[in-house]
């Protein structure tokens, strides 16, 4: 199966035609006798889960500090002024979603957030911006150092994207094409139909060019709290828009809690002490 044909076909929820010439519905596709929507089976030890948690909390912490609100909406302005007296929030520049790009040595390369509104460009999502930032930085290093070895298909192998919301079709495709190794996310987005799982399950045997391994951050306390808060928000507001939820005061409060927890984090695994120290330093110096 040609991956580009598949990615294009995903936008209308159909795969390329079968050998009989019939279009195959996405939900009927089976990979290795398992539905393509299924989460991969992962065996994460406590050290790895703690490292993932540190980076997810770091992404959430920076996102909270950069939180944007709709200042043109009097109700929003009043609610936030009452909840956070004295704090000046940014004008809403895009959905309150942030992503970290981390290399294979567990060093943070960059943080990016959604800037679709500010740039009037619906493609300016956090994950896409993080990948593009990383590629530009690595290319700059290559040319500065005169190192012409390795091409774009190898550049981000071994890298991980940590993002506060499950990735959309666009960002999943970009991370796939960039050969990102895994994506770890803090909140499910049911509107994306598990596209990250679909790509991973279909192409996981094409190592090293398989799609990123999707990792649900369910081991982070706030993962379930975000899910519950969004479910209640959907009932109260009669909307299933998760990005609208991420502009709500309830979501902001949960991100504030992660911000506080990140800054007071107690590392249990010795190898993660350095991971936390550099993540905290990055968060404090890149705001």
Image (spheres, rainbow, N blue to C red):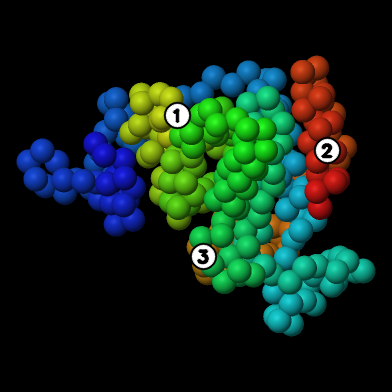
User: Which quarter of the figure is the N terminus placed in?
Assistant: top left
Q: Which residue is mark 1?
A: 40
Residue 224 lies, with reference to residue 73, above or below; the image says above
Tag 3 secondary structure: loop
Q: Nearer the viewer, residue 266 or 111?
A: 111
- Give the side of residue 95 with respect to residue 205, left or right: right
Give how far across and how far down residue 103 sits, in percent: 64, 31
- Give the side of residue 192 with respect to residue 111, left or right: left
Q: Nearer the viewer, residue 220 or 143?
A: 143
- Please give the label number shown on residue 122: 3
Q: Nearer the viewer, residue 12 or 49?
A: 12
Q: Which residue is mark 2?
A: 280
Q: CA distance from mark 1 to mark 2?
A: 30 Å
Q: CA distance from mark 3 to mark 2?
A: 30 Å
Identified at 29% across, 30% down, the residue is 31
Q: Quadrant of residue 82?
A: bottom right
Give how far across and how far down residue 84 sits, in percent: 86, 65
């Amino acid at each position: 199966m040609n991956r580009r044909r598949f990615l294009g076909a995903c936008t209308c929820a159909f795969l390329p035609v079968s050998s009989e010439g019939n279009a195959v519905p996405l939900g009927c596709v089976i990979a290795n006798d398992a539905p393509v929507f299924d989460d991969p089976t992962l065996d994460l030890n406590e050290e790895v889960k703690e490292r993932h948690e540190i980076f997810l909390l770091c992404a959430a912490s920076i996102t909270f500090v950069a939180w944007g609100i709709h200042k043109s909406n009097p109700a929003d302005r009043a609610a936030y002024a009452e909840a956070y007296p004295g704090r000046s929030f940014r004008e809403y520049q895009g959905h309150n979603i942030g992503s970290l790009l981390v290399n294979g040595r567990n060093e943070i390369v960059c943080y990016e957030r959604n800037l679709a509104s500010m740039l009037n460009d619906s493609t300016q999502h956090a994950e896409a911006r993080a990948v593009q930032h990383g590629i530009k930085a690595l290319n700059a290093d290559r040319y500065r150092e005169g190192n012409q070895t390795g091409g774009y298909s190898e550049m981000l192998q071994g890298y991980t994207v940590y993002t506060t919301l499950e990735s959309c079709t666009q960002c999943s495709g970009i991370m796939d094409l960039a050969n990102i190794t895994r994506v770890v996310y803090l909140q499910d987005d049911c509107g994306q139909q598990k596209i990250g799982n679909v790509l991973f399950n279909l192409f996981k045997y094409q190592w090293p060019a398989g799609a990123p391994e999707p990792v649900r951050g369910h081991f982070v306390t706030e993962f379930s709290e975000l899910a519950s808060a969004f479910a209640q928000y959907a009932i109260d507001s009669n909307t299933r828009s998760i990005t609208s939820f991420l502009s709500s005061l309830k979501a902001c409060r949960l991100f504030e809690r992660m911000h506080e927890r990140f800054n007071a984090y107690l590392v249990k695994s010795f190898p993660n002490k350095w991971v936390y120290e550099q993540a905290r330093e990055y968060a404090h110096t890149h705001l």
